[in-house]
Amino acid sequence: MKKRAIIIGGGLGGMAAALTLSRHYDVHIFEKNAWLGGKMQSIQVGEHQFDYGPNTLTMPRYFWELVAPFGDAKKLLPFKKLDNATKHQWGEHEVTFTTNRHNMQQQLAAIDPVSAANYPAFLEEVTRLFKLSEKAFLTKTFFSIKDYVKPSLLYHLVQAHPFETLDTFLARYFPHPTVRQLFGRFATYIGSSPYASPATFAMIAYFELVDGTYYLDGGATTIARVLEELLLEQGVHIHINEQIEKLAMANNEVTFCETAKGQYSADMIISDIDYAVAQTLLGRQPRTYELSTSAYVELITLKEPVPLHYHNVLFSDDYKAEFQFLRNSQLANEATVYSCYPYAATKEGHPGLFVLVNAPAKTALSMKKAQQQVNEALTRWGINTSQIEARKQLPPSYIAETFHVMQGAIYGQASNSLRGSFFRPANKDSRLKNVYFVGGTVHPGGGSPIVVKGGYEVAKRIIVENNNCIK
Ligand SMILES: Cc1cc2nc3c(=O)[nH]c(=O)nc-3n(C[C@H](O)[C@H](O)[C@H](O)COP(=O)(O)OP(=O)(O)OC[C@H]3O[C@@H](n4cnc5c(N)ncnc54)[C@H](O)[C@@H]3O)c2cc1C
């Protein structure tokens, strides 16, 4: 009889681990909500089916790597590349991201010729940083202190610009503050500040500017649907609407999980839930740390198409002040506003706009400012109220309550420090022999491709280290 692996949480991290373990273990996924995919959720507003959570899809290779053992990866997940992915606007400037270097240089030259001239060197450095990070961190799992004290880790860490901030690093290539702001925004992909997070995260630029930005017909939630189909084919037991409420322990192991519907014996537990919440489930007091940002989201259905790009960013004038507000747990007086408009590529169905303003991880906060900022952004994008059919507002409390996340912090601990960036919670519990952690709040971190990569790598190591999967 196969040993039983219980996965707590059906987000991307849990699904990736479950799928990889499914050939070796009797896998059960427990998800408190009615759907699998976690924050990768489909939400209906009026006629339109929105993607909540991941809208910017990058690094298809990590998704393909996960599904490749179960079919033709590129057919299962036919990612399509966006040519002109994200249009960024300031008062008098605009830049649309593309992987075409020459085109990017031309656009940057309109703002600052020196920044344009340095762009190829910047791409070379972010490519080096990505390759280094992939080798040293993204493909590595951290199960015990032994994994941290390896000389090779220290060697790679020192080469990854850990001691300078992303903004200082960018200043070496881009003397113009507008261009620095453009690339500093990558820190928000991990819920952090470009003025505090290590320059290592410049490697996120590799994802969009070297590898590219992608979309899937049917939206991002296609990924969750495809993974769920593969899990079912593999015989994984999926328990939706079933929250793990209690864990029973004996001899430094979790032996049983309890839900409102019953008790389930477990040979191993893989938690995909917020790490701090998992600690309380294990009967511990979570450590306090600076939380990553949350989000204020509006899902807006439109009566008619509008002339927007797939991804759109309206930058604030004072980016530094914006992050000071967020780190002080307040909404910024003037915020950068992002929108996703998939109709720009698909021209299918009803046009809908996903709008996001970075918000602090704090559930008890008035969202009036953010609502006002969304209204102003809509006006700047040329959308008037008569074109709007319906709108749904989702504040940080939505994230906190729907996914059981500490204060609605999307990525758990912020990456605004060395510890938060390089020493995130490990993938194996230090005290309990059979408890593992995956998902965006632990190593290697958040963002859908990284979460999938993490879940896949943890499961692979579990299989190797527990090659006796039969009871
Ligand atoms: C608004 C927003 C925008 C984003 N934009 C992007 C983007 O553009 N690109 C990108 O790559 N990423 C984006 N992300 C980040 C991305 O969604 C996450 O990093 C990733 O989906 C996290 O997956 P996970 O498996 O770690 O966690 P989750 O998706 O949170 O999954 C954990 C699951 O555990 C369940 N759960 C919790 N407690 C229990 C319990 N006790 N028992 C059973 N189940 C439980 C929760 O309901 C949840 O479904 C965004 C996120 C948000 C919220």
Image (spheres, rainbow, N blue to C red):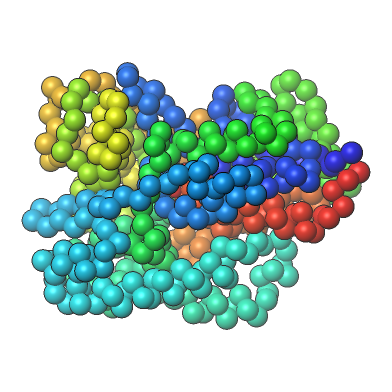
| Of residues 383 and 292, the one drawn nearer to the viewer in this rendering | 383
Residue 132 percent coordinates (x, y): 51, 73
In the visual, does 100 lie left or right of 24?
Answer: left
Q: Is residue 274 visible?
A: no
Residue 277 percent coordinates (x, y): 61, 41
| Of residues 191 and 56, the one drawn nearer to the viewer in this rendering | 56
User: In this rendering, is residue 261 above or below 70?
Assistant: above
Q: Residue at x 35, y 51 (%)?
A: 81
In the visual, does 180 lie left or right of 449?
Answer: left
Residue 216 percent coordinates (x, y): 40, 41
Q: Residue at x 47, y 75 (%)?
A: 160
User: In this rendering, is residue 417 above or below 397?
Assistant: below
Q: Residue at x 56, y 42 (%)?
A: 12
Q: Which quadrant is the N terminus positioned in?
A: top right
Quarter of the image for residue 193 reads bottom left
In the visual, does 300 lie left or right of 160?
Answer: left
| Of residues 233 and 266, the one drawn nearer to the viewer in this rendering | 233
Residue 54 percent coordinates (x, y): 42, 42
Q: Which quadrant is the C terminus positioned in?
A: top right
User: In this rendering, is residue 137 above or below 310?
Assistant: below
Q: Residue at x 20, y 77 (%)?
A: 117
Q: Is residue 74 visible?
A: yes
